[in-house]
Structures are given as C-alpha cells and as structure tokens.
Image (cartoon, rainbow, N blue to C red):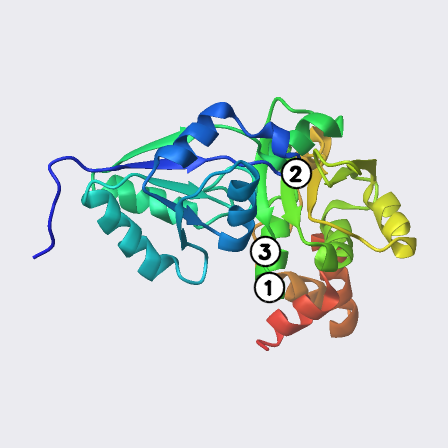
Amino acid sequence: MKFMADKKGTLYLCATPIGNLGDISSRCLEILESVDVIAAEDTRRTLQLLNHFGITKALTSYHEHNKKSKGDYIINLLLEGKNVAQVSDAGTPAISDPGEDLVRLAIENGIEVTSIPGPVAGINALILSGLPTSRYAFEGFLSTNKRNRYEHLKSVQKDTHTLIFYEAPHKLLSTLKDMKQYFGGERKIALARELTKLHEEILRTTLDGALEYYAEKSPRGEYVLIVEGASEVATDEECFWQDLSVTEHVDHYIDGGIQQKDAIKKVAQDRGIPKREVYNEYHNI
C-alpha cells in the first residue's frame, strides 16, 4: 500500500521566459529553488535555465509522449507531500502543453494547484499586432492531419474574434496557404517571431502579403499568428448551402443541370475549401 502523507504537496505552474531571461520573476525563481522536483517538458532546456540562475534541483521529464506514465508518477509525488513545479519549454505551462492534463489529474486528486504568472507568447503577440484585443480566441496549433486542419479552419472561418495560432517555421507557408483558402487573401494578419529576443520581428500585413513575403524569405523561429476576425457583414450573409452536407451541396448543382466536375468546383468555391476535399467526400474516399 502506497504511503500517504498527512499533507499533500502543491503543484506550481511556473511561467518561464519565452526569450529574454530577464523576464523571469523573482517569485518564479524562489519557487524553483524551493520545490522538491521540477517537471520539465525539455529537461535539457530547463537545465540551462537553472544553471544560468545557479539553481540545483531534481528534474523529471514530462511531455506529450510520456504524460500518462509520468503524470501518475508526479501525482504520487504530490500525494506523498512533495512540492512539484511544472515548466514548459518556454512561457506559461498548460497552454498548448501537456500541463493541461497534469492540472486536471491534480484537481481530481484533491491536490492544490497554483500558478506563478509570467510570459505568454500568444498574449505578447496579440498586444503587438495592432488588431482588436477586446475579444480574441486562442486556437493553438493546427493539426498536421489535413482533414482535421481544414475542419479547424472552417470552424473559425466566420468567427469575429481576433484569432491566435501557433506555428512552426517548416509549416508556416502551407498554413498561410490554407488560411487564405478559408479566410481570403485580404484578411489582416500579424506574424510574430523571436518575441522578447534581440531580433524580435512583427510583420503586420495581409495573408496575400505574408505569402508574398515568405515566398522570398525562409521562415525562421517559432511563430505566433494573429489573424483578423471575420467582419460582421460577412458573417450575416446567409448561404443556401449552410445546412447541406457536401454531398447534398454537390447534388444541388447537378440537379440544376451542372456537370459533376463543375459542381464539385462550385462547392469548393462556395465553402472555401480545396476541390480535392470535396471530391473525396462526395465519392467517400
């Protein structure tokens, strides 16, 4: 039977710098020095941070690929009375991060959870974007699965909130192309990279402008994409096909005397999605 302490430990969600090490808070350093264990998304990166501030502490890895087994291990430490700090690669944990699952597990086990606030890349990019900040939606990373990716973009196509996405450099161009298909080339976007670092860059343009810019310049660094929300006028326009499935939409045009190939093309244009996706769904591929 596992030993249970009289008092459970506390899980601390510690926000670490997204670039400039000077952005770490004194409270965060105090917590990192005082806890029993630090659960890190990348122990090598966290070790560099700790070494910079002269902190020696036991580390355990906790990331997307081991979150189930390590989550149970960390919860057991907390149940035994140990205090644990969780840190992500950079910024605030539990946002597009497996810390979300650890928080849920801790709450389910009656463990106290508290946050040590600090940098958040998405919020930093938002306030620098020049786009509306009063209402926004955090969308995180788009899926690498094409169908899921298109469904995600389609679901926010008419969202009037400013949209926040994260993206890796090697996927940036394909993401911009997909966004253009769903949002249109004139939709405003701010692309933020190297935030808080020496070469911080904010490109404020349109989706067409961003595609033109990165056709000549290779993307570098992790990106935050701040995308203008849809206009109220656009979202108020009712489309006859809104309640139709893709198959019903294609059949509507065919019944009107249009050839299947052209009907598929028109459906793709109506919905702002690739023709191949319409073709595959219509033919159950």
Label 1 is placed on what type of residue?
Answer: Arg
Q: Which mark is residue 147?
A: 1
10 Å crowding of disc 3: few (<14), some (14-19), many (20+): some
- Tag nearer the camera, 1 or 2: 2
Residue closer to the observer: 239 or 143: 143
Tag 1 secondary structure: helix
Residue that carries the numbered disc 2 in the rendered image:
19
Label 3 is placed on what type of residue?
Answer: Glu
Q: In this rendering, would 244 be left or right of 43? A: right
* Above or below: residue 225 compared with residue 247: above
Tag 2 secondary structure: loop
Label 2 is placed on what type of residue?
Answer: Gly
> First in sequence: mark 3 or mark 2?
2
Residue 3 locus on image (x, y percent): 11, 50
Q: Which mark is residue 151?
A: 3
Q: Which mark is residue 227?
A: none
Q: Gap in Å between the C-alphas at discs 1 and 2?
A: 34 Å
10 Å crowding of disc 1: few (<14), some (14-19), many (20+): few
